[in-house]
């Protein structure tokens, strides 16, 4: 079983393109693993507790439960628009999740890993956590990433994070696949050094925060949102589920292969808090999942002097991009393709509407769309709508067939390493090569020469075959478009193929094709 999750989205605002990228990336990986023949379980969802949710609900004059229900609908609507195919949906207000969280808290308390103490210090409103001097910058200030910081004097419960740090350092140093890509490992090791000797505050007093899961051993406190939210990865996978629950079988899903998160929540929450929590409740090194850490989409910005740069996309700056509006303007295929084509996994990229249009028009409309229309149109016109056997086989035909092996090797390698953009480059090269092949033979011209009918049939069969192969390889990325292509090929069996089945000849000679309809109508960007 290939179990992957994304970070669940905090219900304190609407989804933006950063959320959309993470979910589409996970969806592409899940669909690819299914293409590989794996059983896959993809979990995503929403994080509904916390002080910011309570404060926003109060400003709106509604109950927090009403507020998060409304915001959650916005997320599920966006994911429907983007064509996500997830298997599990997590909402942290779910009673089964609450039961799991409280069970873990009680167990840790019984084992002496939770204690109560008073703390006087600084608190980040944005991150909802207490800060120490280790979070100050070189000027002795708390950086902008912490938002509004205020002093507090408060009694709370603490998890003995410090008991786990030595194990965590050794684990990170010896497990190369824990953090992907590799260059993020240094961030984790540096954060571990800052964490040494500190414990994690895991509660908030009800006099300040009521919207959360009560501590089972002290109902005057609710659980810190990170301790609650992170547990979703196992609670909705069936960890300690009650008898009769319809949650999955935990032993079949775990260990999870992959958690997909943004770089902003790598440290400390996922790489330190979460892994230490898992270790404390008995998970072995082999049961700790890998973290695939993606970068941010930034916004291109032009300075007063005309120089181009970029700035972080954020709600406070008012520069976030609505993925629903994007899909409604350009279509699901264009948005999904752009989100994983124009960013290298793990790196940042600048959101650029002109590149979205350019990539769609050049690589899909002009390249694949043109090949599909040519192949099917000429097969209908010159071969009666079916591919025909031929004894013609020159070097260009052999070269096109041989190029498939190269493409499959590159595609599999990059997709296995979650490098979607590089895998797409390989598929685009194959489609481009097929169009070059068509230009070499010019079937629209040789069709006029009866002596070249054998060559014509071979060329058209090769073109139709290449379209079929491309539709299978691209289906994890643009599933709807590829289904439309396969419908026009009248090749329902393509939907059942695995990656191991892909070889030249997935269409039999005599394959009937339909009259083509444009799958990728060119996008015209208004001035």
Image (cartoon, rainbow, N blue to C red):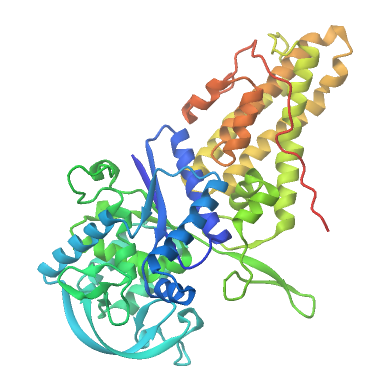
Question: In this rendering, would 308 be left or right of 479?
Answer: right
Q: Quadrant of residue 393?
A: top right
- Measuring from the top left, give residue 262's x and y in whole percent: 47, 62
Q: Quadrant of residue 402?
A: top right
Which is nearer the eye, 477 or 193?
A: 477
Look at the image and tell me whether residue 6 can be seen: no
Residue at point 68%, 26% (across, down): 400
Look at the image and tell me whether residue 104 can be seen: yes
Whether residue 480 is situated above or below residue 267 in the rendered picture: above
Residue at point 34%, 63% (across, down): 229
Whether residue 99 is situated above or below residue 30 in the rendered picture: below
Which is nearer the eye, 87 or 400?
A: 87
Question: In this rendering, would 418 be left or right of 305?
Answer: left
Whether residue 102 is situated above or below residue 284 in the rendered picture: below
- Measuring from the top left, give residue 141's x and y in whole percent: 46, 90
Residue at point 57%, 37% (across, down): 479
In the rendered image, which quarter contains the C terminus? bottom right
- Measuring from the top left, give residue 378's x and y in whole percent: 79, 19
Q: Quadrant of residue 487?
A: top right
Q: How many numbered marks are there?
A: 0
Question: In this rendering, would 374 be left or right of 291?
Answer: right
Q: Residue furthest front?
A: 61
Question: In this rendering, would 42 be left or right of 517?
Answer: left
Residue at point 62%, 40% (across, down): 426
- Measuring from the top left, give residue 322's x and y in whole percent: 61, 60
In the rendered image, which quarter contains the N terminus? top left
């Amino acid at each position: 079983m290939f179990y992957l999750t994304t970070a669940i989205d905090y219900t304190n605002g609407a989804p933006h393109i950063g959320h959309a990228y993470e979910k589409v990336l996970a969806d592409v990986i899940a669909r690819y693993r299914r293409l590989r023949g794996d059983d896959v379980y993809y979990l995503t969802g929403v994080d509904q507790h916390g002080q910011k949710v309570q404060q926003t609900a109060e400003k709106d004059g509604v109950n927090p439960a009403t507020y998060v229900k409304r915001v959650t609908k916005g997320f599920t609507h966006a994911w429907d628009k983007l064509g996500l195919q997830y298997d599990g949906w997590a909402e942290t207000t779910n009673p089964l999740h609450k039961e799991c969280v409280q069970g873990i808290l009680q167990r840790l308390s019984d084992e002496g890993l939770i204690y109560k103490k008073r703390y006087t210090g600084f608190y980040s409103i944005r991150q909802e956590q207490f800060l120490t001097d280790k979070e100050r910058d070189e000027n002795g200030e708390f950086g902008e990433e912490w938002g509004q910081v205020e002093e507090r004097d408060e009694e709370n419960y603490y998890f003995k994070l410090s008991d786990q740090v030595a194990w965590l350092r050794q684990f990170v140093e010896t497990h190369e696949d824990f953090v992907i890509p590799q260059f993020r490992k240094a961030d984790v090791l540096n954060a571990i050094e800052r964490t040494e000797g500190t414990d994690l505050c895991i509660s908030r007093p009800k006099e300040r925060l009521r919207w959360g899961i009560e501590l089972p051993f002290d109902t005057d406190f609710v659980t810190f949102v990170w301790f609650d939210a992170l547990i979703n990865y196992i609670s909705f996978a069936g960890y300690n589920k009650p008898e009769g629950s319809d949650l999955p079988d935990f032993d079949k899903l775990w260990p999870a292969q992959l958690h997909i998160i943004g770089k902003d929540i790598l440290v400390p929450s996922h790489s330190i808090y979460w892994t230490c929590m898992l270790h404390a409740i008995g998970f072995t090194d082999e049961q700790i999942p890998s973290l695939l850490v993606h970068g941010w989409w930034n916004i291109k910005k032009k300075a007063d002097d005309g120089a181009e740069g970029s700035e972080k996309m954020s709600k406070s700056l008012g520069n976030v991009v609505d993925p629903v509006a994007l899909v409604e303007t350009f279509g699901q295929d264009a948005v999904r393709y752009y989100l994983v084509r124009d960013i290298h996994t793990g790196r940042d990229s600048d959101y650029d509407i002109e590149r979205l249009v350019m990539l769609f028009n050049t690589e899909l409309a002009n390249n694949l769309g043109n090949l599909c229309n040519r192949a099917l149109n000429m097969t209908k016109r010159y071969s009666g709508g079916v591919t025909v056997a031929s004894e013609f086989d020159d070097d260009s035909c052999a070269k096109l067939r041989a190029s498939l092996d190269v493409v499959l090797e590159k595609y599999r390698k990059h997709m296995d390493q979650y490098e979607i953009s590089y895998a797409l480059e390989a598929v685009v090269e194959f489609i481009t090569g097929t169009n070059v092949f068509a230009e070499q033979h010019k079937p629209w011209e040789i069709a006029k020469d009866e002596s070249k009918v054998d060559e014509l049939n071979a060329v058209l069969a090769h073109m139709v075959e290449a379209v079929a192969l491309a539709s299978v390889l691209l289906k994890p990325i643009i599933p709807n478009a590829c289904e439309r292509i396969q419908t026009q090929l009248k090749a329902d069996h393509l939907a059942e193929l695995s990656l191991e089945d892909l070889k030249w000849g997935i269409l039999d000679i005599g394959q009937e094709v339909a009259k083509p309809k444009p799958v990728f109508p060119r996008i015209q960007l208004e001035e």
